[in-house]
Amino acid sequence: MIEDGDRIMVCLSGGKDSYAMLEMLQHLKAHAPISFDIIAVNLDQKQPGFPEHVLPNYLDALGVEYKIVEEDTYSIVMDKIPEGKTTCSLCSRLRRGILYRTATELGATKIALGHHRDDIIETLLLNMFYGGTMKSMPPKLVSDNGKHVVIRPLAYCKEKDLVSFAEAREYPIIPCNLCGSQENLQRKAIKNMLQDWDLRFPGRIESMFRSLQNLVPSHLLDHQQFDFKSINSDSGIIDGGDIGFDKPEVAPRFIDEDEEAPERGERLEIIQLK
């Protein structure tokens, strides 16, 4: 994710995640066996009441190189988006373009974003529910303009751990009054659903996240990812074969490594008893 000689532009919003990401990257910079530079960048979108002094004071105290980019995207979004509609799509497009331009100006080789594990799962469900695609946000990928490498150092961190860490570190949190406070966001509904699941079904979120690392294309429906047409009786058993005549069961590959997987006959017996 980070290579020797990198200049990493750390996108700092003033939220818990970006603060934690910056501190983590500072720690890595001090102890990693490679050399890389960090520059924190905040986009001041001129939201009413935005405390402009908070981040400069915090970063000055840390001695971190930084740049505050001032662009009045707030007025543009408020002018273009009808009242009652969500502002996220336009706001994110404007913000993305400005940050890409800034990365080029600063000579950054990587753009670090503070998305965590729960953000990744939320994005997966949003794409499934509303976009008809099974995709999310990877830890590392080239940007959509083809000019930058985007990294997500917190990709495997749980949001609740970041909340606890931010409270312990007493970060000067700056709330987002533009998008974060909208009640009709689809993402907010997904977040509430996942938080409810986490309370009622411990381990479900962890299992969902593991599934993103354990894809089985032969047991899905995308012919571009798996050549279904070429399968014949000589193809042999692929990824355990088709067990459509059996009752559904949890695949052994998703059972916790610390938990001994029961034999196939025992699993079927357990299912039948249920």
Image: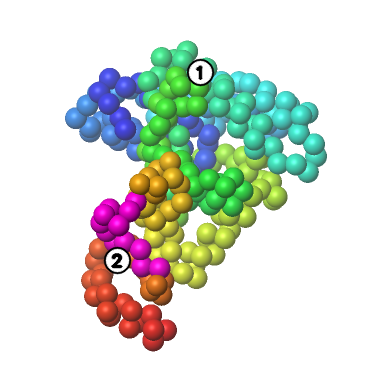
Q: Is residue 16 visible?
A: yes
* Residue beneath the point at 23% across and 33% down: 31
In percent of width and height, residue 87 lies at: 69, 37
| Dot 1 alpha-carbon crowd within 10 angstroms: few under 14, some 14 to 19, many 20 or more | some
Query: In the figure, residue 29 lies in which quadrant?
Result: top left
Percent x, y for residue 129?
59, 52
Which sits in the foreground, 270 or 6?
Answer: 270
Based on the picture, tell me whether residue 189 belongs to the magenta stretch: no
> Does 169 appear above or below 13?
below
Quadrant where the image shows the N terminus: top left
Q: Earlier in the sequence, mark 1 or mark 2?
A: 1
Question: What mark, if any, has residue 247 been given in the picture?
Answer: none
Counting labels gives: 2
Question: Residue at label 2?
Answer: 252
Residue depicted at 45% across the width and 47% down the height:
222
User: Is residue 253 in sight in this rendering?
Assistant: no
- The majority secondary structure of the magenta stretch comes to loop
The residue mark sitting in front, 1 or 2, is 2
Amino acid bearing label 1: Thr
Give the residue displayed 42% in from the left and 84% down from the top: 274
Q: Position of residue 109 (x, y in %)?
A: 37, 20
Estimate the spatial distance between the alpha carbons at disc 1 and disc 2, rounded to whole Å: 47 Å
Along the viewing direction, whichever of 116 and 89 lies nearer the viewer:
89
Secondary structure under the numbered disc 1 in the rendered image = helix
Residue 89: x %, y % from top left? 64, 35
Residue designated by label 1:
102
Residue range highlighted in magenta: 231-244
Residue in the picture at 47% in, 13% down: 105
